[in-house]
Image (cartoon, rainbow, N blue to C red):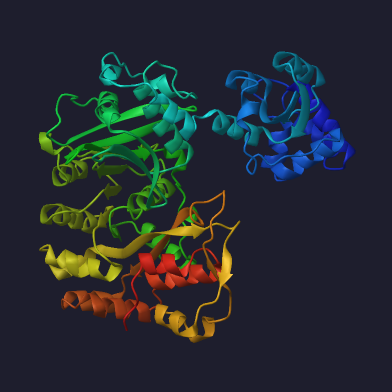
Amino acid sequence: MDRFNKRLKNVLVKNGVLTTEQADEMGGGTTESDQSLADQVIEQAILTEDQLTGLIAMEMKLPPVDLERVTPEEWALETMSRETAQSYGVVPVSRIGNVLTIATANPFDLFRLDDLALVTGCVLRPMVSSTRKIGDATRNAYAMSKEKVENLFEDVDDVSYAVEDIAIEEDDFVEDDGTGDSPVVKLVNLVVFQAIREKVSDIHIEPSETKTRVRYRKDGVLYETISSPKRMHNAIVSRIKIMAGLDIAEKRRPQDGKFRLKIEGRKIDFRVSVLPVLNGEKVVMRILDASNLALRLDDLGFEEKTLSDFRQALASPYGMVLVTGPTGSGKSTTLYSALTEMANVRDNTITVEDPVEYQLDGIYQVAVNPKSGLTFAAALRSILRQDPDIIMVGEIRDHETIEIAIRAALTGHLMLSTLHTNDAASSLPRMVDMGVDPFLVAASTILVSAQRLCRRLCDECKEPIEVSDEKLLGMGFKPEEIGSKPIFKPVGCSRCTDGYRSRFALLETILLNDEIRKIINRAGSATEIKEAAIAHGMITLRRAGIQNMLKGTTSGEEVLNVSVADVH
């Protein structure tokens, strides 16, 4: 690495990217713990990853290659093992006869490339890429393909033996596709590894009359991936049950469990739910990967006004802040982000959750356990004796819990929680319906909000679309907004799923004022509250969606799917 940094330093100085003094100050790679010079140049935004690759390629008179757009050929991959590719820091790209095209981040080391030529018995044709892209491409290229999965099932008539002597270890899945003899172990490893690589949130393993179907939920939508013969189903379920510590002999009752795996250096938690259905047992695994969790409110995609309202409420010394919405709308992520932003050594922050999805540093988290009597209400009572400053209750479900939460909010504690309501305005009458005096609701509540997750258009393939003025007005566009900016539609390409990549949050907030409190005190309706909030500048979910359409962030179809029209 030290030799690579010296050569790269000369290239950067020669091309005027860095002065000699700057390059010497960066150093890089002189000790094992040092960050490489290439990483420093990219991290400090001196050059982008692609610009640096291009500069090295130009210096060495070699072609650059974007491995995110190129799929390595199977024949090329057969020239070397995954371990060899990782050891030499290359990925085979293509092969014609005895000529092997490889991608490398270090074309300066000619001796190492000569070594590799001897190992492979091929004439090497190097191209230049970045270390990150080579690492990603190597993991992806050597992952098991669907065709390889089908080969697992050939000549397998009875796989009941496959689960007899399975022992699950944390490192079973570390950067490999499973090397055990059992096709079931290989299949489960594949399903889990592919799900992590594709950043899905849930894995569904579903029995039918003739096969077992595997589906992934990505960006809120389920997609079918692979299918296996029906005869494999019981063995697959048993393997997962063993991993989750469940009873493999019990097939008539629902079971819930969890396990943790170390995959590519990351510890990832899985929540497992097994449900008996008509043709066997249906398994759903929720993936809790903390590396995918956005723990900054700025990263969630909120509009400036709603983010300002939310932060203003979080700055209050006491009172209640509610995030509402259906299951899967990102409420927990928003609350985790809020807690992380507020965390400091001066405050005692405690949460009670069912279950604890992610562990947060410096925050004390309590997991609900109804079997032992630790309900939300019981935990909340105990928390109040722990001298808390900030309390987060995962969900308010009943009168007892909300009564204690409101009492805490009125006695000097900042209380964060969630409710299942359709919009922000409905939350306030809902609390009254749960048996709380309207005066206490008005006095304790600082802010109520409603949230939805909206798919983000892929910037690589989205295209402008013509939409009639009538349709846009019907959606809620203002006349002056029509034609002001292009509206885009999803298309779909190799970098996205059906034209979308990732999701962001839409949020509507009601920061309570005197007028809204008066409406609550006289038991006014949700409609009255919403109209008063809009009059004071509230951005509704539909308006937040429209603003993101105008930014080119999402499509009209997606906004219609996640929000309802505003009725005035």
Residue 82 in the image: state x and y as whole percent: 58, 22
- The residue nearer to you, when weighing 148 against 198, is 148
Please give left or right for residue 6 compared with residue 488 in the image. Answer: right
Q: Is residue 358 visible?
A: no
Q: Residue at point 12% right, 66% down?
A: 433
Quarter of the image where one finds residue 137: top right
Please give left or right for residue 502 compared with residue 324 in the image. Answer: right
Q: Quadrant of the N terminus?
A: top right
Q: Is residue 407 visible?
A: yes
Quarter of the image where one finds residue 270: top left
Residue 250 in the image: state x and y as whole percent: 14, 28
Q: Residue furthest right?
A: 14
Residue 465 in the image: state x and y as whole percent: 55, 72
Please give left or right for residue 221 compared with residue 68 in the image. Answer: left
- The residue nearer to you, when weighing 205 against 309, is 205
Please give left or right for residue 352 compared with residue 28 in the image. Answer: left
Q: Residue at point 35% right, 28% down?
A: 260
Quarter of the image where one finds residue 64: top right
- The residue nearer to you, when weighing 132 against 85, is 85
Residue 79 in the image: state x and y as whole percent: 65, 21
Numbered label tally:
0
- For residue 521, above or below residue 236: below
Q: Quadrant of the C terminus?
A: bottom left
